[in-house]
Image (cartoon, rainbow, N blue to C red):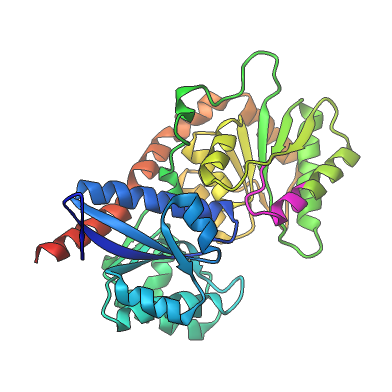
Amino acid sequence: MGKTSNRQVRRIIVSGYYGFNNSGDEAVLKSILNALHAEGEAHGITIEPVVLSADPAWTTKMYGVEAVPRMSPSVLLREIRRCDGLISGGGSLLQDATGWKTIPYYTGVLSLAQMLGKPTFIYSQGVGPVNRGWLFAPIRRVMNKSKYISVRDAESAALLGRIGVAQERVEIVPDPVMGLPLPAGADEVSTKPPSGDALPVVGVSLRHWRKDGADLERAASALAALAKRRAVRFRFLPFHMPDDAATSQIVIDKMRMLGLGESSAELASPGDDPQQMLLEVSRCDMMFGMRLHALIYAANQRVPLIGLSYDPKINQFLNRLGLTPIGTTEQLDPVQFAASADSLLSDLEGWRTRHGEAIDRLKRESQRPAQQIAALLSQTMKR
């Protein structure tokens, strides 16, 4: 343990789905790094993060922090031995919907840190779905040995309770991205589209989910129905490159075949920086989102939103705002969507008034895990 500017340094590994060019997960990382820096300062310590990344060079360039390969056993062992603790999260790390290997990897990293006597912290994770019963044991083991546990929704906490994690040890907090600020200087000028005769901007964030593409057909029909009801400017925002860009182009082509009337559709290219994507979202009048972090970005910037559910985490986030999905990847009524979106675009300020208090609360509470972790690290040093 060293000193920098008379502050004691704590070297903390951050484990998550980082370096994969997914804007949502990169926003999680950026939000965690920001919060750790601020709370470390508030507690009189310097928290020095080391990120486990699929692309360490890119992560270091993007965030100015040390990053190392996430899949190298020798690197993991070396870095954990050198660290003062390990953070796992945020994001949906402990789930098997995307395959059975995800949970063994993240619990394995936690187990290694715990075996080496390092404190571990669970940072605003979404837990589940877990459909393979044999995966409950490793989750229970690493959770019960962690110094601090926070999850991003009540459903995650309930699942941990069912598999044997004491509920009083689990704190429910918002997704870290609720606390992500706009890039420096962006809040000094208006980020909203100019008023007057400009068309309202409808942000769209879709992902490929069903193999047969039926969900994308339904989304295209719904958006085309809105275009025929009123003139808008659809701006597609790809959160995971290059997949979301290809998906967006498919939907745009289908919408054009169905007819856009006086409306237009375009594909944005915000680049890799999650704060630039947040800025893009802030410039929308409304967001239609399938990606969880598209909806979180919109709430962060008080952009009225409509969610399309493909996973329980979408419903859980919308719930916290007092909302429900407009449909799912299995069912989406174009007429109902067009009517709802038209109504929302006609009463944007009313939506902000109705949901502003919930948004403010989520933004405040998003800092809670970093506050708790910094406090625990500073207490450790005082002993």
**Picture coordinates of residue 210 (x, y %)?**
74, 62
Whole-percent x and y of residue 321?
47, 43
Residue at 26% across, 79% down: 117
Image quarter of residue 283: top right
Q: Which residues are magenta?
A: 236-248
Residue at 78 percent of width and 65 percent of height: 211
| Residue at 81 percent of width and 43 percent of height | 252
Name the side, left or right, on which 76 lies relative to 332.
left
Q: Residue at x 67, y 33 (%)?
A: 202
> Height in image: 257 above or below 32?
above
Image vertical order of residue 140 relative to residue 28, above or below: below
Using the image, determine if residue 24 lies above or below residue 10: above
Q: Quadrant of the C terminus?
A: bottom left
Q: Is residue 294 at least partly visible in the picture?
A: yes
Q: Is residue 164 visible?
A: no
| Image quarter in which the N terminus is found | bottom left
Examine the structure image and report whether residue 3 is included in the region drawn in magenta. Answer: no
Look at the picture and state if 133 lies above or below 49: below
Label tally: 0
Q: Residue furthest left?
A: 383
Image spot of residue 293 (x, y percent): 55, 49
Name, please, the residue furthest toward the top.
196
Q: Is residue 228 left or right of residue 104?
A: right
Q: Describe residue 341's horizontal placement relative to residue 29 as left or right.
A: right
295 or 306, nearer to the observer: 295
Depth check, front residue: 214 or 117: 117
Q: Position of residue 217 (x, y in %)?
A: 81, 51
Instruction: Describe residue 221's horizontal placement relative to residue 157 as left or right.
Output: right
Along the viewing direction, whichever of 217 and 180 lies nearer the viewer: 180
Whether residue 237 is in magenta: the answer is yes
